């Protein structure tokens, strides 16, 4: 335990130092967020990782020991000695338990306080965010999707928009989940001081993310920095919340101005990988395993017949059952497939990864999701075996590998018995009551899905008691008409019927084990390539026997499809692929396993009847596309007619591939500005109405009137709230975006602002004096310095030496402008 604490602390310390020195001051906050969380997890899990190294065995001469008659264990024998009780482990574990309990109580107290705040104060819901309005609240803070605000300031609009956006970012980015994870980790590892530094850095990075979101909305850095200072406070607040006044204001002000290039981000991200490799190699467990070398045996030289074995392996829902039919001292063992480990078996049963001289055979078995992997250790002709194993499927192995042979004795174990009883002319088949009239159908129902092997391994047992002769004669007569009698009884009268039935059952059994040729859209295609056009892809249908199959196309993950048809979403996706693969077919009946290797490669082709556009249409497209592309690239406010957009899209979609490649580039319509909002509906009427001594805002449209209270919630005519969610401001009056409605300088209703504020771009910076002189020189202006005429080169040289000279440019009626350069300030005469 002490070794684990040292290793985990060292890992956490290295990861934290890397963050402090390399990442903390960089403007890559999302990456930093995930780094801190993964660093916490890795720091506590790396010491559990085991790196196994396999080494060759070394051989030394030893003394001879005769073989043991049975496996025994050799526990270490020591002389009993008096030992003093060591109280240190008890004391340390007691201290640890008390610490966990104290931190758990602290966590529950903080969580309870937040829940009480939420339940006992008024709430205002806006989409997925809930504002909790509290009296006498100093600083806004956030927990999960709840934002805690001062009620008076919120109602009087005294909380800046930047503060609300800051807290809104904490809620939408779910920063509280990170804090809950760190708090729970702190409960378990309260003794580790590094966890407290990690907790502080996680919270500080949350503030970086919220600050970044505010600044991206166009807020000036200086304005926002003054706002942070105004909200700074020594009030600590609840440890489970995010608050705008979180400490380290100085760091936040510095990081706001930091810009990190993409190249720098990539380099610093890649440096993490070798660091992780060093930590895993340096602080994980090391284990050396000696390779076991066992002489191979072959079928020809195999002489030790006592080690012959036969084991069946059957997969169930969450386990694998091993049954030994021959050569073992055990009959049945059960393995758990959820443990993700390997097991070692001998003819005695489970082993502790060791083999004894008395073991006739030994092997390891490792189950996985799709099958098993075996490694022969002793007494096997194989070193490794692996095969697929599906649920309820049975495979068999022996000393020579996978086998389908049934050893002697197994048939006796698999024999079935049909028990019948007739008492007082009342007939029972097993525990189910039957009758003379239904006997043939009842028995045939039991045997209808049997194979020939089932009939051959089944015996018939009839017991009668107090039955009349007429009843028994009738029963015997009916029994000769059953499938069981016709299949198992040999007689001259039933021989022909029996042979017909055997042929029928044999054919049925073969059909169950072999699938017909795989088809796609009624075309036989088994391990083949087929060309389909886009319209045919939408209607792909495979053979009726297909129960599941998989699809793989470039750039996507493998998709598992249920049934034998494509759904519309997958078909639409495949239309844009050049080719895709159908494979891993699962069928509704039994089948030979080799059929599961079937595949169909589908190549997507263009429709043959697609003639593309005409020469005139191609010229029309090129002209329209060129005009639209020039508008988008050259004009700050491009103007494109809607009918031109529709026409260009129609012509482009009509072209075949070669025409598209030679035509004008298709316009990027995403760069066009959105259309202007529709004009207000003249039929809409708005106004104010007093309901329950409170002024409400109402909107009437098409005879339907809606009423809104102070918080923008819809009410009925009596003032009862219909929906407690704040209404979006662009849904109140058609064509308008409303945040607040005033009457007599007081807010009547306030609605949710669900759109981004369109911030106009900043004006371009003024040209420098030198740039102005160069521009005027290009225009052929005349230059004067202190009243004397000079050349343009001399004017440029003057400005390069002294950029504080004063410049006055005058444009007279003549075409040539005049530029005056002086040391004294320029005076303008009216």
Image (cartoon, helix red, strand yellow):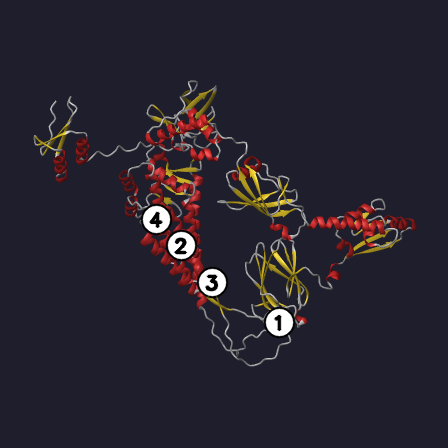
Residue 179 or residue 647, whichever sits in front: 647
Q: Nearer the viewer, mark 1 or mark 2?
A: 1
Label for residue 50? 3
Question: Residue 372's quadrant in the figure?
Answer: bottom right
Cα separation, mark 1 vs mark 4, equals 60 Å
- Per the image, the residue denoted by label 2 is 39
- Per the image, the residue denoted by label 1 is 359
Residue 311 or residue 248, whichever sits in front: 311
SS class, disc 1: loop
Question: Residue 661's quadrant in the figure?
Answer: top left
Question: Does the image show residue 799?
Answer: yes
N-term mark: 3 or 1 = 3
- The percent coordinates of residue 137 (x first, y second) are 35, 40
Question: Does the image show residue 732?
Answer: no
N-term mark: 2 or 3 = 2
Near mark 2 (Cα within 10 A), the count class, few <14, some 14-19 or many ≥20, is many
- Per the image, the residue denoted by label 4 is 265
SS class, disc 2: helix
N-term mark: 4 or 3 = 3
Cα separation, mark 2 vs mark 3, equals 19 Å
* Quadrant placement of the N terminus: bottom left
- The percent coordinates of residue 243 (x first, y second) are 35, 44
Query: Disc 4, disc 3: CB below 8 Å?
Result: no
Which residue is at 75% across, 61% downward? 412
Q: Nearer the viewer, mark 4 or mark 3?
A: 4
Q: Is residue 36 above or below residue 749?
A: below
């Amino acid at each position: 335990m002490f070794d684990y604490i040292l290793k985990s602390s060292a890992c956490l310390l290295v990861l934290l130092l890397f963050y402090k020195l390399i990442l903390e001051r960089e403007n890559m906050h999302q990456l930093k967020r995930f780094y801190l969380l993964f660093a916490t997890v890795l720091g506590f899990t790396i010491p559990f990782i085991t790196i196994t190294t396999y080494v060759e065995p070394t051989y030394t001469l030893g003394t001879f020991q005769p073989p043991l008659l049975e496996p025994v264990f050799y526990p270490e024998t020591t002389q009993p000695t008096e030992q003093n009780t060591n109280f240190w482990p008890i004391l340390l574990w007691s201290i640890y338990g008390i610490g966990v309990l104290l931190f758990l109580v602290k966590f529950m107290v903080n969580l309870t306080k937040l829940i009480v705040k939420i339940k006992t104060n008024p709430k205002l819901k806006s989409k997925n965010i809930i504002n909790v309005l509290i009296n006498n609240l100093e600083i806004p803070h956030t927990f999960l999707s709840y934002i805690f605000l001062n009620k008076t300031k919120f109602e009087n609009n005294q909380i800046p928009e930047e503060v609300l956006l800051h807290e809104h970012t904490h809620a939408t980015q779910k920063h509280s989940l990170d804090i809950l994870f760190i708090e729970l980790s702190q409960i378990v590892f309260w003794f580790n001081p590094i966890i407290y530094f990690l907790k502080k850095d996680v919270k500080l990075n949350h503030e970086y993310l919220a600050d970044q979101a505010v600044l991206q909305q166009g807020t000036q850095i200086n304005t926002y920095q003054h706002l942070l200072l105004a909200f700074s406070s020594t009030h600590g607040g609840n440890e489970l919340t995010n608050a705008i006044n979180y400490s380290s204001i100085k760091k936040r002000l510095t990081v706001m101005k930091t810009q990190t290039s993409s190249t720098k981000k990539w380099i610093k991200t890649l440096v993490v990988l070798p660091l992780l490799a060093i930590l895993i190699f340096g602080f994980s467990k090391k284990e050396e395993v000696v390779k076991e070398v066992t002489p191979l045996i072959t079928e020809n030289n195999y002489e030790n017949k006592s080690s012959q074995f036969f084991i069946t392996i059957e997969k169930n829902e969450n386990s694998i059952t091993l049954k030994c039919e021959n050569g073992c001292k055990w009959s049945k063992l059960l393995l758990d497939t959820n443990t993700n480990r390997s097991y070692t078996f001998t003819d005695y049963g489970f082993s502790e990864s060791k083999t004894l001289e008395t073991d006739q055979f030994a092997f390891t078995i490792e189950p996985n999701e799709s099958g098993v992997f075996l490694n022969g250790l002793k007494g096997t002709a194989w070193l490794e075996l692996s095969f697929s194993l599906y649920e309820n499927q049975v495979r068999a192995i022996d000393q020579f590998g996978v086998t389908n042979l049934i050893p002697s004795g197994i048939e006796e174990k698999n024999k079935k018995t049909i028990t019948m009883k007739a008492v007082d002319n009342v007939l029972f088949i097993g525990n189910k009551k039957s009758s003379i009239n239904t006997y043939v159908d009842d028995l045939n129902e039991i045997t209808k899905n049997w194979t020939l092997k089932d009939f051959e391994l089944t015996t018939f047992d009839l017991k009668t008691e107090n039955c009349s002769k007429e009843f028994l004669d009738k029963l015997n007569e009916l029994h000769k008409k059953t499938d069981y009698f016709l299949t198992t009884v040999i007689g001259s009268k039933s021989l022909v019927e029996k042979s017909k039935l055997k042929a029928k059952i044999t054919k049925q059994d073969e059909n169950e084990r072999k699938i017909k040729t795989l088809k796609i859209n009624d075309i036989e295609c088994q391990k083949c390539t087929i060309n389909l056009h886009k319209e045919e892809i939408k209607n792909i249908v495979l053979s009726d026997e297909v129960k599941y199959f998989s699809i793989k196309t470039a750039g996507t993950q493998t998709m598992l499809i249920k049934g034998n048809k494509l759904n519309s979403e997958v078909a639409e996706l495949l239309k844009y692929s050049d080719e895709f693969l159908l494979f891993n077919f699962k069928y509704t009946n039994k089948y030979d396993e080799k059929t599961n290797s079937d595949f169909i490669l589908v190549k997507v082709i263009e429709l043959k009847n697609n003639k593309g556009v005409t020469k005139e249409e191609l010229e029309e497209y090129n002209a329209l596309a060129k005009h639209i592309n020039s508008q988008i690239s050259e004009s700050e406010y491009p103007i494109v007619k809607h009918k031109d957009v529709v026409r260009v899209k129609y012509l482009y979609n009509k072209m075949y591939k070669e025409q598209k490649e030679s035509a004008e580039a298709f316009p990027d319509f995403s760069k066009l500005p959105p259309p202007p909002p529709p004009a207000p509906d003249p039929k809409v009427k708005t106004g104010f109405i007093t309901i329950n001594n409170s002024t409400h805002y109402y909107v009437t449209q098409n005879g339907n009137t809606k009423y809104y209270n102070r918080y923008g919630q819809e009410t009925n005519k009596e003032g009862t709230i219909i929906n407690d969610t704040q209404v979006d401001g662009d849904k109140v009056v058609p064509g308008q975006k409303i945040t607040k409605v005033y009457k007599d300088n007081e807010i009547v209703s306030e609605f949710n602002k669900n759109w981004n504020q369109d911030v106009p771009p900043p004006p371009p910076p003024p040209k420098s004096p030198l740039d102005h002189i160069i521009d005027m020189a290009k225009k052929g202006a005349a230059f004067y310095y202190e009243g004397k005429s000079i050349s343009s080169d001399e004017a440029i040289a003057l400005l390069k030496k002294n950029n504080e000279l004063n410049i006055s440019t005058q444009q007279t009626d003549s075409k040539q402008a005049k530029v005056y350069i002086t040391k004294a300030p320029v005076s303008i005469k009216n």
